[in-house]
Each structure stands twice: as C-alpha cells, then as structure tokens.
Image: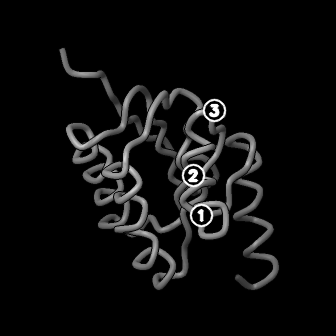
Amino acid sequence: MPNSFSVSGSRQEGISVLALDGFLDAHTAPAFEEAIEKEVSAGHNRIVVDCARLAYISSAGLGVFMTFIEEVREAGGDIKICAVIPKVGQVFEILGFNSLFEIVGDIPQAVARFAHSRAEGG
C-alpha cells in the first residue's frame, strides 16, 4: 500500500503557504513539485512550506526544494521551511539544508521573516 501524501495551499499576507502532510518520496514528489510550479507560474515567489504534518522525506522530496530555490530567489523571492518534526529536521540538517534554507518554528514566524527580509532590502 503506498504511503499517503497531500499538499494544500493557502495565502497569508500575500505569501503562499504549502502545507505538506504524510510521506514525501519518489512516488509523491511530483504532487509537491506541481504545487510549487503552480505558485511560481502565478508569480508567487514568496513561499512557506509547512512541514508540521510531514512524517517522512526522501531524496526525491528534497530534490523538489532544490529544483525551485534558485528560480524563486532570482525572481526576488524565497522558500522558507517551518514546523519541521525532529525526524525530518535531522534529514535537513545532515544534507545541509539549514545553511541553504531558513527553517523556523511555525507559519507566523516564516511569514514574519519575509517582512523582516523585505525591510532589510532582501
């Protein structure tokens, strides 16, 4: 039986929030990729990925983040990650995501970081 995964999108203060739920692996990564592509295509380059309900991430899932980060940053935006459970956080840490992505505690913190970085001119 395949692992379940879903991604739901919302907007908060002009920022796209993608909430991940379940197992993000090679079978489910295309759904996440499609969700980010939809945001980027709509010109939404400030994206928060809420990982509060993300139980597992594989290299394929991590690859989705890497696929879009350069394009989003070149367009003046960013991808911020929040609410990472320890098991997933450990994977991010091992692979150096902490130095590539800003990882914060929750959605309001991530949204606030966009306001903060904009105030600094970045």
Residue identifier under label 2: 92
Type of amino acid under label 1? Gly
Q: 38 or 69: which is nearer to us?
A: 69
The residue located at (56%, 38%) in the rendering is 88
The residue located at (54%, 73%) in the rendering is 77
Q: 11 or 57: which is nearer to us?
A: 57
Q: 41 or 54: which is nearer to us?
A: 54
Q: Position of residue 102 (x, y in %)?
A: 67, 61
Is there CB contact under 8 Å for labels 3 and 1?
no
Q: Position of residue 115 (x, y in %)?
A: 75, 65
The residue located at (36%, 51%) in the rendering is 59
Q: Residue 96's quadrant in the figure?
A: bottom right
Is there CB contact under 8 Å for labels 3 and 2?
no
The disc at residue 61 is none
Q: For the residue labelled by badge 3, is the local secondary structure a helix, a strand or a loop?
A: loop
Residue identifier under label 1: 96
In three-dimensional space, the C-alpha distance between marks 3 and 2, rounded to whole angstroms, equals 11 Å
Q: Earlier in the sequence, mark 3 or mark 1?
A: 3
Colouring convention used in this rendered image of the protein:
one colour
Q: For the residue labelled by badge 2, is the local secondary structure a helix, a strand or a loop?
A: helix
In three-dimensional space, the C-alpha distance between marks 3 and 1, rounded to whole angstroms, equals 16 Å
Horizontal side of 8 relative to 29 (left or right) equals right
Residue identifier under label 3: 85
